[in-house]
Image: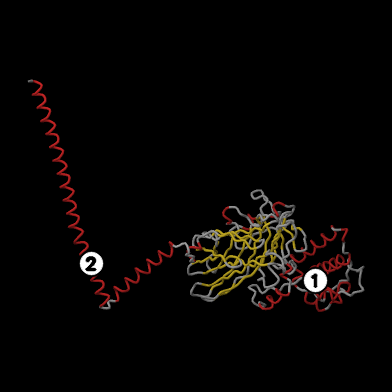
Amino acid sequence: MKKLVYSAAIICMVLAAASCKSTKAEKKASKKKAKSKAKTAVEAPAEEQAAGQEAAAEAALAAGLTEGADAAAGAAAAKNTETAKDSKDYTGWIKSSKKNLTERFGKVQIKIKSGIGSYTIAVLNDKDKPVPVLSTANEYVTNAFFLKNSKKTYNLITDSAVRSSARQTSDGAVITYEIPSVAQVSVYFSCMASQKKKDTDMIKATVTVKNLSDRNDDFAFKALFDTVLGEAAAFHFYTWEDIPVKSEVLYRTLQNQKWFVSKNTNAAMQLFFSGADCTVPEIVALANYATLEKNSWEPDMLNYRVFDTVLSYNNSAVCSIWKAMKLAPSESGKIVFYIALSGDGTPATGEKYIYSEDAAKAETENSGKSASGLEIITPFSSPEVEEAVPAEVTEFPAVSEPVISSQPVTVSEAVESPAEIPSVDFYIQNMSKEQLTPEYIQALLDRIAALEEDSPSLNRQELLRLNAELDAILTYLRQ
């Protein structure tokens, strides 16, 4: 009997549990159904509202409401722009200008950090590996460009007020710097070959400065090259005559310097600031980088100071400063210089182009357009000097003891009356004020020293001629 009671109790409990579960399931189902109905009730009016708005928009457009049409056109243009930016084929200026560039043309490699506008240059060796000729440290910022107007000097690489961008061209690359409401500067590196049937080994740098202000202003441009080749060699730089530059030097005229060389056993770089269509600078300085990076526009240099200092060891650089250009609003000025490279251990051959017929034509076309207006003189190869030397003269016995008038003689008087120094009158006839500058005299001394050191191939006639010219100049300076 007890078993029957227990069994009945258990059956009742099971049925009660099943009834509870079904009730809960029904409640959940009813809740879901209610939510679904509520959602449908909300969505239906929303859809009706959207349909009503669409119909209203169509009616507005049909009625010729220009405001609605303009809004629709603007939305469509924005959508098209977003689609274009997402497309892989989009190559607009904004997108490409933010990318860093690494371009190779023949033996030349140019790398640009577009975000800051810094750059570096390398030459490819026989194994097709790049050998840097300018510094690659600190994101290349030590290879800097500067612009100065009447109010301020801007470092175009590091100044936060300058916006920079870059793009590739068919033969090189262009870096653009913009100072809002002040100026726009573009530096176009165009790669070329120094000789016909030779691989690309040369860069023509064309700097364009445009006045963005609403008034006339003066703009001066400066370039700082942080060189590295000479830091692994006996000397940092050489002149075009392969004479080593043993101490810091500043040139205010390039009449006796056709180019400058930075080289070691692996590579060589020539810097051309004169010849062809180059814009001759007002100043060129070869010095320790610490000397040239200071805030002063012109470097503060000491004569015959060595390249290395206690705080900056074995760190050489080149600084070139061009004379200010007076530009009207929206007017532009242009500056041109060249860089030639070699990566196979042989000298660079940029002079083959700079002094070629093609370059001579370019120089003729651009004559009178130089920002500095300086005349380029090469006294050692000047036709006038060579014609003035009699062919039969091989010795100058009286050079060391020139005949000097007892009356004071000025430079202009001496030029007009060469008879007062008869032993060197062939130089007096061609004497100019430029020959009395310290830079010219130093170049003479360097050339004489180089000839005397190179005794196996000593050119006695040239040595005598240079000594004669030096004696004549010193004679003038004593008056």
Q: Quadrant of residue 117?
A: bottom right
Name the quarter where the N terminus is drawn: top left
Residue 209 screen position, x and y as percent: 56, 70
Let me know if residue 414 appears in the view.
Answer: no
Residue 183 screen position, x and y as percent: 52, 69
Q: Is residue 52 left or right of residue 378?
A: left
Name the quarter where the C terminus is drawn: bottom right
Question: Earlier along the polypeptide chain: callout 1 or callout 2?
Answer: 2
Amino acid type, label 1: Ser
Residue extending furthest left?
1
Amino acid type, label 2: Ala
In the depicted structure, whether residue 199 falls above or below residue 328: above
Residue extending furthest top?
2
Instruction: Check disc 2 and report its element: helix, strand or loop.
Output: helix
Residue 439 screen position, x and y as percent: 74, 65
The residue that mark 1 highlights is 381
Q: Along the line of sight, which residue is nearer the eye, 167 or 29?
A: 29
Instruction: Check disc 1 and report its element: helix, strand or loop.
Output: helix
* Residue at figure coordinates x 11%, y 25% from the top left: 7
In the depicted structure, whether residue 244 falls above or below residue 401: above
The residue that mark 2 highlights is 51
Q: Along the line of sight, which residue is nearer the eye, 378 or 227?
A: 227
* Residue at figure coordinates x 77%, y 65% from the top left: 441
Within 10 angstroms of label 2, few (less than 14), some, or many (20 or more) residues? few
Residue 57 screen position, x and y as percent: 26, 71
Q: CA distance from mark 1 to mark 2?
A: 89 Å
Within 10 angstroms of label 1, few (less than 14), some, or many (20 or more) residues? few
Let me know if residue 426 appears in the view.
Answer: yes
In the depicted structure, whether residue 155 falls above or below residue 55: above
